[in-house]
Image (tube, rainbow, N blue to C red):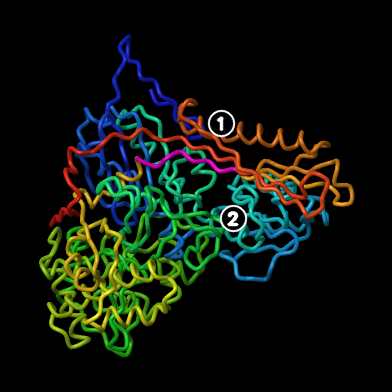
């Protein structure tokens, strides 16, 4: 039986009087394009079987179910652990397709840009000691909530110095939940670092991601139930550790780079390399990151996601919005790749019966009118997603976009009598109500013969149309696309490894100087899709040990299984008054502010309370208490000639639970690179 309460999974392994021996673990990775599944033997870590399927929107259960469809049901019945990772959160921020959020800024906040359109700046907040500066204006907050609740999917609340006292954030959260029942994200729950702007941004992005992560988790749970899998379920975080499903729902921002973290752990697992750089080529983006001595390199100050500075300690990475499904388009005789993704022509031609005929007969587009939406190879299709608040212009355009019949910009212009506004189309795309079809690097590989999974004819027609705009033959055009993609991989790798060098110079050297090569002593592992198609080209651009491991196409799903349980908790103790430093102390923790008379009592309470919080978190993730190791690090600020307890005491309580890993010699007999052809 599978019991679910607030998405925590309990397991019963008994049927009748017999005990089932659970032999396997299941890893699932949902990317923007593909959903991968992998079965691993618990005893020795060997890969038993794997499968890939297309990620499906808006019903993600279909893609997850398809990924598990070819997996032996006997293996699934003996799965004891399901661990998942995803790039959906990352892609949502990069593509600016997250759900709208109502942001409430309490107290003094900088007048910077925020990732929300509906923003209220209101009175309130606390000082450095957690004392209230100004009362909350509940009437103003209530009016704002009532005005925007039909336009947003969640709320974010960030109060000045909420890390010292979260009282105002919690009161506003209670108000919103009682009036709307909608999700509310508080800044103090996400970061204990000083940085009011970054904390507000982190809370807003977190709120924007709640719907997509909730949908992924709910879809996964549904499929697991349908497949009669009795197992505990974890999710990989952006730092390579794992969290419970409930934590993932509460703090989806911490999964923002779980895909890259999974690729690092998966690459290390598949190659048996403790130290390597990884180039992970997905459908939406190409990510470069580093694992050193078996540990992913993490940002010290917080990850930058889609240009937004956050307080999330995530894998350090170099990312570009150039993936296998990036849109290739022409404007002013310039070839552009990305940043937006589309459905490749080769795949769309197998899904939509009218597309190939449309490609053959559609008129050539004038060069003067070309932009990202007006292309001879771009089409629009309606998704199944239900729409919320739309403008009249959006409603009018959406009515002429069909679910099954892809339509070009010219088609839509004829149906509407006049061309639709590009900004209206972009708005519908960002809201995931409209999906685009176009030429992609995957289409280029189909024409070149590097990869032939779907309709080659559609790719060929597309390459002829786009090539003609730049006076290229189809084959030459596709070689140019492949070369641009390979140069981008090399460029992102070198700028990641050598951040101190000017980026323009690096790009120029890689692109135009065939006599000079950058040399890397760290092995480079390629993961994802048909990455072997780019290996030879990459080898010509850089001097490095480049490896394409077996199972490279499902490396992230493997990585999802082997993250460790890590919980980091920060606390701080200061005297309530610097003029009376020998008594009355304030303890700041993620669950609130405490006043304790004696310093040493405060210190002891902080340690014990912190250990309890960390242990409870680990147990909720399903780790055994005997596997949990907790360390407490203290950092004290004591001025010279100071004879009282410390002015500040910073505590970091770190809990680590190591997942049991077997060896994998069954598939990895040596450290040499294994090049595979069709590993999609």
Mark before the other along the chain sequence, 1 or 2:
2
Q: Residue visible at 58% across and 47% down?
A: 183
Residue nearest the viewer, comparing 437 with 417: 437
Task: Write down the quadrant of residue 419 in the picture.
Answer: bottom left
Instruction: Name the residue at the top extreme.
Output: 17
User: x, y percentage for residue 586?
Assistant: 78, 44
Residue ID for mark 1:
616
**Callout 2: 10 Å neighbours few (<14), some, many (20+)?**
many
Residue ID for mark 2:
203
- Front of the two marks 1 and 2: 1
Residue nearest the viewer, comparing 219 with 449: 449
Q: Is residue 654 left or right of residue 95?
A: right
Mark 2 secondary-structure assignment: helix
Instruction: Name the residue at the front extreme.
Output: 641
Residue nearest the viewer, comparing 398 with 54: 54
Residue nearest the viewer, comparing 31 with 198: 198
User: x, y percentage for residue 544?
Assistant: 24, 65
Q: Is residue 382 left or right of residue 386?
A: left
Q: Does residue 365 lie above or below 453 as drawn?
A: below
Q: Is residue 573 left or right of residue 429?
A: right
Task: Point out the stretch of residues depicted in magenta.
Answer: 562-569
Task: Write down the quadrant of residue 615 in the picture.
Answer: top right
User: x, y percentage for residue 38?
Assistant: 26, 41
| Magenta region, main secondary structure | strand
Picture quarter with the C terminus: bottom left
Task: Write down the quadrant of residue 323 in the picture.
Answer: bottom left
Q: Does residue 283 lie above or below 265 as drawn?
A: below
Q: Are marks 1 and 2 in contact (CB under 8 Å)?
A: no
């Amino acid at each position: 039986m599978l019991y679910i309460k607030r998405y925590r999974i309990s397991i019963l392994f008994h049927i009748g009087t017999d005990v089932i021996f659970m032999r396997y673990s299941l890893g699932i990775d949902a990317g923007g394009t593909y959903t991968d599944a992998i079965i691993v033997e618990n005893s020795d870590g060997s890969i038993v079987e794997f499968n890939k399927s297309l990620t499906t929107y808006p019903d993600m259960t279909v893609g997850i179910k398809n990924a598990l469809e070819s997996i032996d049901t006997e293996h699934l019945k003996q799965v004891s652990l399901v661990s998942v990772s995803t790039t959906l959160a990352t892609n949502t921020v990069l593509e600016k397709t997250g759900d709208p959020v109502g942001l409430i800024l309490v107290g003094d906040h900088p007048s910077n840009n925020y990732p929300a359109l509906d923003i209220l700046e209101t009175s309130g907040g606390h000082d450095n000691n957690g004392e209230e500066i100004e009362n909350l204006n509940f009437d103003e907050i209530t009016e704002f909530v009532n005005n925007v609740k039909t336009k947003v999917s969640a709320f974010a609340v960030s109060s000045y110095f909420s890390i010292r006292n979260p009282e105002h954030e919690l009161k506003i959260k209670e108000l919103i939940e009682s009036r709307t029942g909608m999700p509310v994200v508080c800044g103090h729950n996400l970061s204990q670092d000083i940085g009011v702007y970054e904390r507000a941004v982190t809370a807003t992005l977190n709120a924007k991601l709640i719907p997509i992560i909730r949908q992924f988790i709910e879809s996964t749970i549904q499929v697991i139930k349908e497949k009669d899998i009795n197992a505990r379920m974890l999710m990989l975080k952006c730092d390579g550790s794992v969290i419970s499903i409930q934590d993932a729902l509460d703090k989806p921002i911490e999964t923002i780079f779980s895909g890259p973290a999974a690729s690092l752990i998966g690459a290390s697992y598949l190659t048996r390399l403790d130290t390597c750089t990884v180039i992970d080529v997905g459908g939406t983006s190409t990510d470069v990151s580093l694992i050193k001595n078996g540990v992913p390199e993490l940002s010290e100050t917080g990850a930058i996601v889609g240009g937004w500075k956050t307080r999330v300690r995530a894998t350090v990475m170099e990312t570009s919005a150039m993936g296998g499904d990036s849109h290739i388009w022409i404007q002013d005789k310039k070839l552009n790749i990305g940043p937006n993704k589309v459905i490749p022509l080769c795949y769309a031609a197998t899904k939509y019966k009218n597309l190939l005929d449309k490609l053959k007969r559609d008129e050539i587009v004038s060069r003067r009118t070309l932009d990202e939406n007006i292309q001879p190879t771009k089409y629009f299709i309606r998704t199944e997603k239900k729409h919320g608040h739309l403008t009249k212009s959006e409603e009018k355009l959406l009515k002429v976009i069909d679910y099954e019949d892809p339509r070009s910009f010219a088609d839509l212009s004829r149906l509407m009598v006049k061309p639709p506004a590009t900004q209206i189309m972009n708005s519908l795309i960002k809201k995931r109500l409209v999906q685009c079809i176009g030429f992609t690097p995957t289409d280029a590989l189909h024409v070149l013969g590097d990869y032939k999974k779907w309709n080659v004819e559609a790719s060929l027609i597309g390459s002829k149309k786009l090539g003609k705009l730049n006076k290229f033959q189809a084959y030459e055009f596709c070689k140019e696309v492949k070369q641009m993609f390979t140069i981008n991989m090399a460029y992102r790798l070198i700028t990641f490894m050598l951040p101190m060098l000017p980026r323009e110079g690096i790009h120029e050297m890689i692109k135009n100087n065939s006599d000079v090569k950058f040399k890397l002593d760290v092995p480079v592992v390629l993961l994802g899709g048909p990455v072997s198609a780019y290996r030879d080209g990459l080898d010509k651009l850089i001097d490095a040990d480049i490896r394409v491991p077996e199972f490279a196409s499902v490396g992230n799903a493997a990585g999802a299984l082997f993250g460790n349980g890590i919980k980091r908790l920060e606390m701080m103790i200061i005297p309530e008054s610097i003029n009376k430093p020998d008594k009355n102390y304030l303890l700041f923790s993620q669950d609130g502010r405490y006043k304790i008379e004696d310093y040493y009592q405060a210190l002891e309470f902080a340690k014990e309370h912190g250990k309890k919080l960390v242990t409870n978190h680990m147990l909720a993730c399903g780790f055994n208490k005997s596997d949990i190791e907790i360390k407490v690090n203290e950092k004290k600020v004591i001025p010279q000639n100071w004879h009282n307890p410390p002015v500040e005491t910073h505590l970091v309580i770190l809990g680590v639970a190591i997942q049991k890993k077997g060896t994998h010699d069954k598939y990895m007999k040596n450290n040499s690179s294994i090049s595979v052809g069709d590993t999609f």
